[in-house]
Image (cartoon, rainbow, N blue to C red):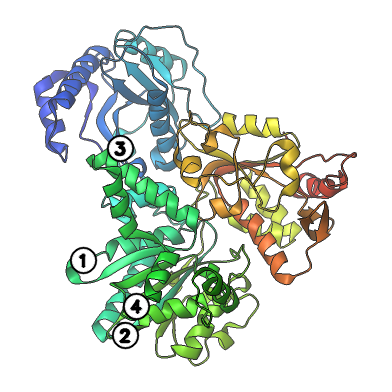
């Protein structure tokens, strides 16, 4: 049941406040504090007075917003309008955080609740003791109004005025309450929800347009159980397009299999430092908020669940015993290091001069120390290698063929795509291995861009220079997922602020090789603190909201924002084909090495797939007086995006 109490207003007004309070308390999962009881009583009394004139309306108390792990105080369905009401009992002012809170509830319903998609949603903040003032109702393009501010005296009049002016076709209350809720959480929200004990099916989409993540979880759990019962060692590769939920799938498995009492430890490992830092910090902050434990204890607990892969690796260097974990999830496994990169690191940083294993080989060897069974889950993003020495998928199979041919290998048929194999033939990569193909190990639909699952397909076509395909896909995106172009950074910032509602996160991102964005105040060479940038509030100058600090592909890979400005520099140009450049000293040079071209292309693939709801592309005009920023460096790209693809300019 999504709400603690639901009834039409006529019956609601006939009940006693104590009877309604009893229903609320019975449906509440935890002990109800006296402060909460008093707040509910005051709400009931106020609403019985306020809504008595609207007997046909439907009222719901404590309606669940699963993605956020919270409940909105009240939903009122009246004259075809969804009123989302949040009470601040006793407040004498309309605080910014409370305004954001009720707007978040309203936009969450609009985006993820099927019964609200095409309806007018009116968020209302009731600060019971605040003063009242005249307010014009402004309704956005998404049919969600700005937050209406009321006190206990004028709530009835405001609802009546809005309902009279904006009446819609009636809503069937029963159908609305039972409509599908298809949340798409950010990876931060998902990690927090899983950590609190929610099932992945509660926080992920389940509609026919997205692959159900629970199917992937079921497939992996079946592999683990088979390995456990048969004393087998297994490795499975979960592939997927950017934003398809690979990290969510991995976190879910690590959370499900974190069974200490069964001696079946599981851990989520990632070589992505910013991702690990942000998730650990987010889990710790959430734990503190819900349980009140100390920050140090909360971080320690979070680090047992999510760890940096290098810590796991370094711990294994000093011993030959197997690790405590029987199940390990390696996030972004395609970024594991080559033999050369690993050997150089071990020699320069660890003082080990004769280390002769690639990182995939060494990581498998650690789990191979177990005498009975073990399972490795590798999460692999196609075209996501963005740094020197990242081995890609072929190195994992080379290690298996050479040293671990007795391991069971599980993949999806989609693993044969070029962005996973780096052009190698999958038949050659798996020769001599015990391979099983399972369709559910591939996630083909982006759930990050919940407005349209075709965003990743559009970006792939664009970067592959398949212009006609990109043009066709973009035509399908325009109504669902806004993409615009500007040559003015101030306009880009303004566009982001106009699009975002409540606490929807905005930010500016750019390639780490974007050396000539400095004249615009954008410098990816200045290291940001990812935790501050991704987690801190609007009033913190270090947060992404301030649109001052710019994040690179290394900061944002695996994470996401709602609305993004991608600042595009001259390191990736267009003149009938893509032209790849590197800035050295005082000038741009051709990127001739194949791996450098690959990393640069993938960097822009990462940047262009970070936004959940829409993005603005900032293409500088350049300068005729600066030979490093000549207009012709940027104009070809601008013409491609606007004239050929059809992206509108603001």
Mark 1 vs mark 4, foreground winner is: 4
Q: Can residue 246 be seen in this view?
A: yes
**Measured along the vertical axis of the image, is residue 323 above or below residue 46?**
below
Q: Name the residue under label 4.
A: 319
Which mark identifies residue 70?
3
> Furthest-bottom residue in view?
432
Mark 4 vs mark 3, foreground winner is: 4
Mark 4 lies on a secondary structure that is: loop
Q: In which quarter of the image is the N terminus?
A: top left
> Furthest-right residue in view?
624
Between residues 518 and 599, which one lies in front from this camera angle? 518
Disc 4/disc 3 C-alpha distance (Å) = 45 Å
Image coordinates for residue 131, horizontal then vertical, percent? 36, 6
Q: Mark 2 points at which residue?
A: 232
**Measured along the vertical axis of the image, is residue 491 above or below residue 423?**
above
Mark 1 vs mark 3, foreground winner is: 1
Disc 1/disc 3 C-alpha distance (Å) = 29 Å
**Measured along the vertical axis of the image, is residue 246 above or below residue 82?**
below
Mark 2 vs mark 1, foreground winner is: 1
- Of callouts 4 and 3, which one flags the residue occurring earlier in the amino acid sequence? 3
């Amino acid at each position: 049941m999504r709400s603690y109490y639901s009834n039409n207003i006529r019956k609601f007004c006939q009940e006693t406040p104590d009877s309604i309070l009893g229903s609320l308390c019975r449906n509440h999962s935890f002990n109800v504090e006296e402060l909460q009881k008093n707040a509910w009583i005051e709400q009931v009394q106020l609403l019985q007075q306020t809504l008595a004139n609207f007997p046909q309306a439907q009222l719901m108390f404590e309606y669940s917003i699963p993605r956020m792990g919270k409940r909105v105080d009240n939903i009122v369905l009246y004259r075809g309008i969804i009123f989302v009401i949040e009470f601040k009992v006793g407040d004498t002012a309309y605080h910014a955080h409370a305004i954001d809170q009720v707007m978040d509830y309203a936009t969450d319903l609009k985006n993820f609740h099927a019964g609200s998609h095409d309806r007018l949603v009116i968020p209302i903040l009731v600060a019971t003791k605040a003063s009242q003032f005249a307010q014009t109702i402004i309704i956005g393009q998404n049919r969600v109004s700005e937050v209406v501010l009321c006190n206990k005296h004028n709530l009835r009049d405001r609802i009546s005025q809005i309902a009279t002016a904006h009446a819609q076709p009636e809503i069937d209350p029963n159908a609305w309450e039972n409509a599908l809720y298809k949340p798409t959480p950010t990876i931060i929200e998902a990690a927090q929800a899983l950590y609190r004990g929610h099932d992945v099916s509660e926080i992920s989409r389940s509609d026919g347009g997205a692959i159900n993540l629970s199917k992937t979880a079921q497939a992996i759990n079946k592999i683990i159980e088979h390995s456990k019962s048969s004393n087998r060692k297994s490795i499975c590769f979960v592939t997927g397009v950017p934003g398809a939920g690979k990290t969510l799938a991995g976190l879910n498995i690590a959370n499900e299999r974190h069974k200490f009492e069964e001696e079946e430890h599981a851990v989520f490992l990632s070589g992505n430092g910013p991702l690990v830092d942000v998730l650990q910090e987010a889990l710790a902050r959430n734990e503190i908020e819900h349980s009140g434990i100390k920050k140090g204890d909360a971080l320690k607990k979070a680090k047992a669940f999510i760890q940096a892969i290098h810590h796991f690796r370094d711990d294994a260097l000093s011993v030959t015993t197997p690790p405590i974990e029987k199940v390990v999830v390696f996030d972004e496994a395609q970024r594991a290091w080559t033999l050369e990169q690993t050997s150089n690191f071990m020699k320069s940083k660890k003082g080990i001069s004769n280390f002769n294993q690639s990182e995939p080989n060494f990581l498998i060897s650690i789990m191979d120390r177990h005498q009975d069974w073990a399972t490795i889950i590798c999460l692999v993003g196609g075209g996501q290698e963005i740094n020197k020495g990242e081995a890609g998928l072929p190195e994992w199979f080379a290690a298996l063929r050479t040293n671990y041919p007795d391991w069971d290998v599980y993949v999806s048929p989609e693993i044969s795509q070029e962005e996973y194999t780096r052009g190698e033939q999958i038949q050659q990569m798996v020769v001599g291995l015990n391979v099983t193909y399972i369709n559910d190990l591939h996630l083909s639909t982006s759930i990050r861009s919940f407005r349209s699952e075709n965003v990743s397909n559009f970006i792939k076509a664009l970067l592959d220079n398949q212009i006609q395909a990109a043009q066709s896909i973009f035509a399908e995106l325009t109504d669902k997922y806004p993409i615009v172009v500007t040559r003015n950074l101030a306009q880009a910032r303004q566009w982001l602020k106009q699009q975002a509602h409540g606490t929807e996160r905005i930010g500016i991102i750019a390639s780490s090789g974007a050396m000539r964005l400095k004249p615009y105040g954008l410098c990816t060479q200045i290291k940001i603190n990812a935790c501050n940038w991704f987690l801190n509030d609007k009033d913190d100058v270090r947060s992404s909201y301030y649109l001052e600090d710019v994040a690179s592909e290394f900061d944002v890979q695996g994470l996401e924002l709602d609305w993004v400005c991608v600042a595009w520099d001259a390191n990736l140009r267009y003149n009938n084909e893509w032209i790849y450049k590197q800035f050295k000293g005082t000038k741009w040079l051709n990127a001739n090495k194949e791996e450098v071209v690959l990393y640069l292309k993938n960097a822009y693939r990462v940047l262009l797939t970070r936004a959940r709801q829409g993005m603005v592309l900032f293409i500088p005009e350049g300068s005729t007086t600066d030979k490093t920023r000549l207009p012709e460096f940027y104009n070809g790209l601008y013409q491609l995006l606007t004239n050929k693809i059809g992206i509108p300019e603001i």
